[in-house]
Structures are given as structure tokens and as C-alpha cells.
Image (cartoon, rainbow, N blue to C red):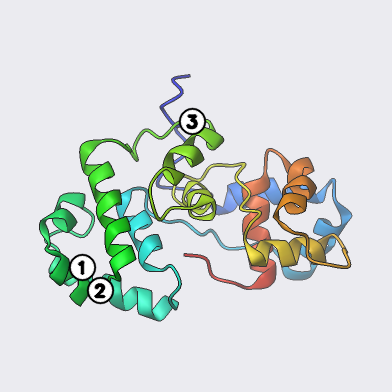
């Protein structure tokens, strides 16, 4: 397989209900705590986001602000840009116009860097590396995109099956609860504890958010 081309099941459909159930059931058969949690609360709904530059731009806008504030900024930007999904539209707007939409100085710099990378093909969102760690490394080379944001993108926008955002607080809390731990595991331990769940860690991440009843991007 060409390492730059994602498998056909990645993309618009993401992790659909059937793939979530398959992955969660696979883990539940091997982990009694997961089986008990599934019996108690059932399966999560799919959480699917669009692939591409615009989803990561929205992630940048959502950093360190409430969901409502991020949505307001996006609405203003969408009204100001000729096409909010086109990086050229952002690049064509002056800084003053972006600041009027609510972009902070830092977010403005991150957004312009992301738009330039998308417009020039430095990052091709239709052909990210098939290897998850390589894709994460490429995405985190963009200023403003950390590992959590990259993992969330690969999970929800590409539907990759084995991505586990162990740095997420809700994931850590519910991992500890489901496994019956006395304390919330930190990121390093959370990754170790989820290793036996390969190759279905993405489905389990969604299930842990479901367990926590938290919304993600």
C-alpha cells in the first residue's frame, strides 16, 4: 500500500456505528470492566467531522475558549471569508478583519500558518501518511496543533481505527473508572493501559467519552 494513501474506509464515514460496536465488543470480550460498562450505558453515537483544513482551523479557534465563543468566532469568520473551507480565503483577509472575527494575535499566526501549509500543499489533507505516528508528526509540525488535536483529527475526521488520545482528561478519568483504578492515570500510564485494546483504541476512546458524557470538537 502507498504509505501516503489512506485505506478506503477512512474519510467521510469516519467511525460509524457498526465500526464502533465492533471495536467496543472486541475489547469487552477481553476486559470485564468494559463489558460491565457497556451493559450499563450502551454504545456511543458516532462522532464524525469533515476531513480537511477547515476542521483544524476550527480546532485552533476553539483553543482556551468556550464552545460558544468558538462557534461565534467561526460564524463571524464564515461571514467574512469568501469560502471558509478554502485556505486562500483566509490568506486574502487582512489581519484587522480576522481580529474583528475574534482571532487573538496567537490564533491569527497559527491560522495563517495552517492556511499557508494547506494552500501550498505542505500538508495534503487528502493524503496524510498512513502510519498514524507519521501523520501525527506531520500535523504537529504546524504551529498551534498539538498531539491531542492531531489525534482527535485522525480519529474523528479520518476514522482511523487505532488512535488513542491518552492526554485527554476525560479519557483518563473514565479509563480509571472503567478499569477500577484508585486514581486517574496520567498520559503515559493511560497509553500503557490501552495497549491491550489495539487495534480498536479509537472505538474505546469514543466509548470513554460516552461514559463521561462529554462532547469533543
Residue 26 shows in this picture? no
Tell me how far mark 3 sits from mark 1, CA to CA: 31 Å
Q: Secondary structure at mark 2?
A: helix
**Residue 80 coordinates in the image, percent (x, y):** 14, 69
Question: In the figure, is residue 152 to the left or right of 75?
Answer: right
**Residue 143 coordinates in the image, percent (x, y):** 38, 51
Figure disc tally: 3
Where residue 172 sits, quadrant-wise, is bottom right
Q: Are marks 3 and 1 in contact (CB under 8 Å)?
A: no
Q: Secondary structure at mark 3?
A: loop
Using the image, determine if residue 77 lies above or below residue 88: below
Label disc, if present, on residue 75 of the rendered structure: 2
Where residue 6 sits, quadrant-wise, is top left
Instruction: Please tell me which residue is depicted at 85% across the width and 45% down the height of the picture.
Output: 30
Residue 120 shows in this picture? yes
User: 35 or 189: which is nearer to us?
Assistant: 189
Tell me how far mark 2 sits from mark 1, CA to CA: 5 Å
**Residue 170 coordinates in the image, percent (x, y):** 66, 67
Q: From the image, tell me which residue sits under label 1.
A: 78
Q: Secondary structure at mark 1?
A: helix
Tell me how far mark 3 sits from mark 2, CA to CA: 33 Å
Using the image, determine if residue 132 lies above or below residue 143: above
Using the image, determine if residue 110 lies above or below residue 177: above
Q: Are marks 2 and 1 in contact (CB under 8 Å)?
A: yes
Q: From the image, tell me which residue sits under label 3.
A: 130
Number of other residues with Cα within 10 Å of mark 3, as a class: few under 14, some 14 to 19, many 20 or more: some
Nearest to N terminus: mark 3 or mark 1: 1
Nearest to N terminus: mark 3 or mark 2: 2
Instruction: Please tell me which residue is depicted at 79% across the width and 41% down the height of the picture.
Output: 196
Amino acid at each position: 500500500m502507498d504509505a501516503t494513501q489512506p485505506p478506503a474506509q477512512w474519510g467521510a464515514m469516519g467511525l460509524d456505528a457498526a465500526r464502533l460496536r465492533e471495536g467496543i465488543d472486541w475489547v469487552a470480550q477481553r476486559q470485564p470492566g468494559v463489558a460491565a460498562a457497556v451493559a450499563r450505558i450502551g454504545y456511543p453515537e458516532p462522532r464524525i467531522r469533515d476531513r480537511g483544513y477547515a476542521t483544524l482551523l476550527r480546532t485552533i479557534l476553539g483553543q482556551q475558549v468556550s464552545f460558544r465563543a468558538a462557534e461565534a468566532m467561526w460564524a463571524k469568520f464564515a461571514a467574512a471569508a469568501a469560502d471558509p473551507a478554502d485556505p486562500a480565503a483566509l490568506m486574502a483577509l487582512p489581519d484587522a478583519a480576522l481580529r474583528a472575527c475574534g482571532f487573538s494575535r496567537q490564533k491569527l499566526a497559527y491560522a495563517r500558518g495552517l492556511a499557508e501549509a494547506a494552500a501550498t500543499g505542505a500538508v495534503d489533507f487528502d493524503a496524510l501518511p498512513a502510519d498514524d505516528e507519521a501523520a501525527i508528526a506531520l500535523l504537529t509540525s504546524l504551529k498551534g496543533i498539538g498531539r491531542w488535536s492531531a489525534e482527535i483529527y485522525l480519529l474523528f475526521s479520518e476514522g482511523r481505527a487505532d488512535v488513542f488520545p491518552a492526554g485527554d482528561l476525560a479519557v483518563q478519568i473514565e479509563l480509571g473508572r472503567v478499569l477500577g483504578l484508585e486514581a486517574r492515570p496520567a498520559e503515559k500510564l493511560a497509553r500503557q493501559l490501552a495497549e491491550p485494546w489495539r487495534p480498536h483504541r479509537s472505538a474505546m476512546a469514543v466509548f470513554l467519552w460516552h461514559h463521561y458524557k462529554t462532547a469533543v470538537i
